[in-house]
Each structure stands twice: as C-alpha cells, then as structure tokens.
Image: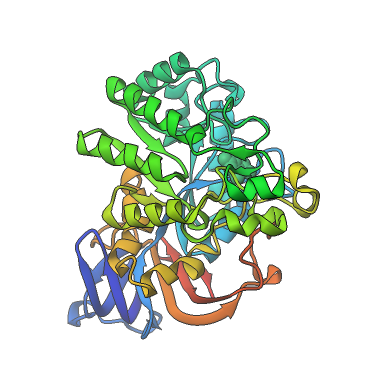
C-alpha cells in the first residue's frame, strides 16, 4: 500500500479540490480520503508526505514525437518515456512520423513492445493516415487499431487531398479511431519559416499565413460532419481556427482540439533574434492569437493541452534559420511553464488539471485521467511553488531544444506513478 498524505487532491472528473489523502493498493486507487481503520498503512507500506503539493490524475499527452525507429539519436522510446515520467505524464500518444513511418502493424507493435519493456509511462501509438504520410493511399486502419493504435494522423504533414481526407474520415470512423489533423495547406505555406506578419517582413523570412491553417480546419469540419468521424485539430494556433471550432461545437459536431504550451506562452516576437529554438510548426503567432487560445482553453472550446514534444539535436538546430528543423521539446517544460496561467487566474486549478489529464484521456478513449477508486493508480504529484532554473543538464530527454532553457520557472514534478509504481521521483 502507498498513501500520498495531505496533498491538495484535484480530480476534475468528480469536481474534487480538497486537502486529503490518496490511498493506492494493488496498482489501483483504493480511496481518495483519509486512510481509515480499514486501510491503515502498516510496516512495509509507504507514506508520502504531500503537504503543499497538488495530487492529480497522471498527465496525458495526445501529441509527442519519439524518433524510434529511425532517429534514435534525437530520442528513442525509452528516453522519451523517461522524459514523460519526469514531466509528470503517465500516458503519451506517439505520432507516426518516424523513419520508416508508423504505417504498419509491425511498427505499431514494435513501439508498444518497446514501451512495455521500459515499464514506465504508457505509450499509445497514433499511426499514419496514409502510407508513408504521403497523402495518397490509406493505411490498414483496422490492423493498426488491432496492433494498439488509438488514432491516426499524418502529423508533420497535412492530408491535403480532400477526397483522400474524406475517405480517411469515413474509414477511421468505422473503427472508432481518432483522426488528428496537422492543419496546413502546403500550397499556402510553401517556403514558410515563421508566422506571416510584421516580424516576418522585418526579418525577411517567408511567412505562414493564418489562412494556411484556417482553410484546412474549415474544410475538415465539413468532411468530418458528413463522415461522423472523431476529428481532432492538432496544435491549433490561430484565432480564426478557434472560431471555426467554436462554431462547429455549437452545432454539435464531435470535434476536439489541442493547444501546445508554446502557443499559449510565446509569440512571433521571440523570433526577432532568429532563435531556431522558436522555429516550430505551426509557427508562434501574434498576441491576439495567443490570447484567443488562452480564452478558448479556459472556456473549453479547446479541449486540452498537448506538448507536441519534438526533439531535435544540435545538428538540426545549431544552423542558419532556414535550414533548422521545426519543433521543440515539451514534456518536461509543460508544468513549470504553464502554471503561470493558473497563478494569473487565466485557468482554475481544476480546469488546468482537466486539460492535461481527464480531457485528453477522454478524447483518446484510454484509461486514466481520474482518481476514481478502482481505476489504475496513475498519479502525478506536483509542487506548484518550487522555483528552479531549466538547464540542459537537467533534461531527461535526449534533446534539449527548447527556448525555455536558462529561465527561472515555478512548479516542479515531485513524483509520477503508473499503476501505483513510482516511475519518477525528484
Ligand atoms: O514543429 C513541428 N515539429 N511540427 C510538426 O508538426 C512536426 C514536428 C516534428 O516532427 O519535429
């Protein structure tokens, strides 16, 4: 038995926000509430003093890039899961843009097997929509689901052909697979290095206009409605896309959306020094987009936060801006960077925890995201007050490409449990 004693327990699935204990037994949540006579810890049981911390359902990430197979020097499944545990994540969904692409049963099964060997954070593959993510031929979605995939996406690339996307939505719906779209009209973003606006003009870099995202969101919402598919907007970044999602939800569509920590916290102004750590797809946009994303996250139009953890080595980042690979790591920066939104009262603690656990678990239809008795003991203990400085040598990920390095942050992961087993402890 393990008792996490005296923390502020936050469980959005049941509206619990209360200082109490969480009792874990046999890998499951036994109780949220004081360990009474029937559940008294004995010799050999562990009691964790959680005073001053938040005890929450293990965090769930719908969007990570682990680079296995193919580019293990950036991240492999074991190192990625280690970074996830250190960041408080107990379940992550891994995108298919590996090399080769995860478009077959064999690769999906390999990824699941590697994760089982690692015995840490749970991994759920999101397999490709099209073979090789080339946008033409659909994958064998039934096979992929059977092998462990919880959804499909060509993330990194958009399914540009509307006829292919229409068939993909219909096919995925027949297997109840989530379809996560990287919304980018590649014709509108040809050569783009950053958000199109005043700063791209000043820097002389080709810009990605908001419309490059918005036209795909608008098109897909029409196609998804007809197909009755579970459609999900990955890494939403533009104010107008938010409006499209809001209107679709008002009409009762089964659409969901995620936003990244960097789109909530940074703008294109960060690019003024040509910092390749801030080069990301979709690009960091303007303050009014960031503010719309924050408001939409608070009111539930955007369902959840996903990291888009995209590790790249110095080789791909320490170079001229145009040659740099897009993406930044996110698993270990999410909690320390985003707690500011709670301190600023942009998000309540319960909504914050929901957006990082219950909501993504519900969207992916995977276990977790709740501290209900009888459920798996996937639990994260957060110290919301700890101040520290993010440094490359403290990062568990194999890559340290993040613009948040060397900044002082407030909030740290104390402990991460999967099935009641400690997979990370500070
Ligand atoms: O910045 C990004 N990096 N956006 C993507 O969509 C893909 C990702 C990657 O795989 O590096």
Q: Residue 257 in the image: x percent, y percent?
A: 37, 43
Which quarter of the frame holds ligand 1? Answer: top right
Q: Position of residue 321 (x, y in %)?
A: 75, 48
Q: How is the image coloured?
A: rainbow
Q: Position of residue 14 (x, y in %)?
A: 19, 62
In this rendered view, identify the residue nearer to me: 139 or 355.
355
Q: Residue at x 28, y 51 (%)?
A: 300
Image quarter of residue 217: top left
Count the numbered circles shown: 0
Q: Is residue 364 above or below residue 332?
A: above
Residue drawn at x 31%, y 46% is 362
Judge left or right: residue 402 versus residue 342: right
Quadrant in the picture for residue 206: top right
For the N terminus, give its image quadrant.
bottom left
Q: Residue at x 28, y 66 (%)?
A: 350
In the rendered image, the vertical position of residue 385 relative to residue 181, given as above or below: below
Quarter holding the C terminus? bottom right
The residue lying at 30 percent from left, 62 percent from top is 351
Name the one closer to the observer, 371 or 28: 371
In the image, 272 versus 347, the foreground residue is 272
In this rendered view, identify the residue nearer to me: 344 or 23.
Answer: 344
- Where residue 175 appears, x then y in whole percent? 35, 25
Q: Is residue 367 visible?
A: no
Q: Is residue 411 visible?
A: yes
């Amino acid at each position: 038995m393990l008792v996490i004693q005296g923390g502020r327990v936050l469980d959005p699935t049941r509206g619990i926000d209360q200082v109490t204990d969480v009792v874990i037994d046999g890998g499951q949540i036994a109780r949220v509430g004081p360990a009474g006579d029937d559940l008294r810890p004995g010799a050999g049981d562990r009691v964790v003093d959680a005073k001053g911390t938040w005890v929450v359902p293990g965090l769930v990430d719908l969007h990570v890039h682990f680079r296995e197979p193919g580019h293990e020097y950036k991240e492999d499944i074991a190192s990625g899961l280690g970074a996830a545990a250190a960041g408080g994540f107990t379940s992550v969904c891994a995108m298919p843009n590996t090399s080769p692409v995860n478009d077959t049963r064999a690769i999906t099964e390999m990824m699941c097997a590697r994760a089982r060997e690692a015995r840490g954070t749970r991994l759920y593959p999101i397999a490709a929509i099209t073979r090789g993510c080339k946008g033409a031929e659909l994958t064998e979605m039934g096979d992929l689901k059977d092998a462990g995939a919880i959804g499909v996406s060509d993330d990194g690339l958009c399914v540009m052909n509307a006829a292919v996307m229409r068939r993909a939505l219909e096919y995925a719906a027949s297997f109840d697979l989530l379809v996560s779209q990287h919304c980018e009209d590649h014709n509108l973003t040809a050569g783009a290095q950053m958000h199109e606006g005043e700063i791209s003009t000043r820097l002389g870099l080709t810009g990605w206009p908001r419309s490059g995202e918005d036209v795909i969101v608008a098109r897909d919402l029409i196609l998804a409605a007809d197909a009755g598919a579970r459609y999900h907007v990955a890494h939403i970044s533009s104010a107008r896309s938010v409006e499209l999602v809001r209107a679709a939800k008002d009409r009762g569509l089964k659409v969901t959306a995620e936003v990244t920590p960097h789109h909530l916290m940074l703008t294109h102004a960060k690019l003024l020094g040509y910092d390749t750590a801030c080069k990301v797809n979709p690009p960091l946009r303007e303050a009014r987009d960031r503010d719309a994303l924050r408001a939409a996250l608070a009111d539930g139009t955007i369902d959840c936060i996903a990291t888009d953890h995209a590790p790249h080595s110095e080789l791909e980042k320490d170079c001229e801006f145009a040659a740099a690979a897009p993406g930044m790591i996110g698993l270990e920066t999410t909690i320390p960077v985003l707690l500011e939104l709670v301190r600023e009262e942009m998000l309540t603690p319960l909504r914050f925890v929901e957006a990082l656990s219950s909501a993504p678990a519900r969207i992916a239809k995977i276990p977790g995201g709740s501290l209900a008795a009888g459920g798996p003991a996937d639990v994260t203990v957060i110290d919301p007050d700890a101040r520290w400085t993010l440094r490359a040598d403290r990062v568990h990920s194999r890559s340290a490409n993040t613009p948040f390095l060397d900044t002082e942050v407030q909030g740290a992961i104390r402990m991460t449990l999967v099935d009641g087993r400690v997979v990370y402890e500070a």
